[in-house]
Amino acid sequence: MDMTGAQWRKSSKSGNNGGDCIEVADNLAGVVLVRDTKDRAGATLTFDPAAWRAFVGMAAARR
């Protein structure tokens, strides 16, 4: 997958203490990318935008 142009942003729920954080790129057509901030060159999870919205909605409901 070509990730050129992905604009990564840190999760709004991530702190600045260097702990467990993720970054999300949701600016590419038809895909949402997620990666670990501590391993940016490592694996990237790929989600369909509808699946990502469902995941975020479920996570928000559990708070």
Image (cartoon, rainbow, N blue to C red):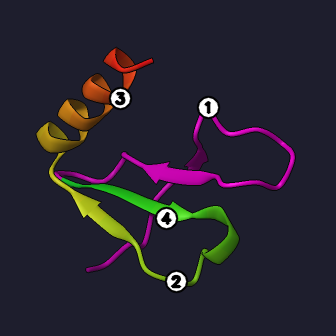
Q: Earlier in the sequence, mark 3 or mark 2?
A: 2
> Pointer 2: what residue?
42
Residue 56 magenta-highlighted: no
Tell whether label 2 touches label 4 (CB within 8 Å): yes
Q: Residues within 10 Å of mark 2 (few under 14, many from 20)?
A: few
| Residue positioned 35% across, 29% down in the render | 59
| Viewer-closest of 29 and 17 | 17
Compared with 30, 35 (above or below) is below
Residue 47 is left or right of residue 24, and the answer is left
As helix, strand or loop, the secondary structure at mark 3 comes to helix
As helix, strand or loop, the secondary structure at mark 2 comes to loop
Name the quadrant containing residue 10: top right
As helix, strand or loop, the secondary structure at mark 4 comes to strand
Q: Earlier in the sequence, mark 3 or mark 1?
A: 1
- In percent of width and height, residue 12 lies at 61, 31
Q: Earlier in the sequence, mark 2 or mark 1?
A: 1
Q: The residue under label 3 is which amino acid type?
A: Ala
> Pointer 4: what residue?
35
In the rendered image, which quarter contains the N terminus? bottom left
| Residue positioned 60% across, 74% down in the render | 40
Compared with 3, 37 (above or below) is above
Q: Which residues are magenta?
A: 1-30
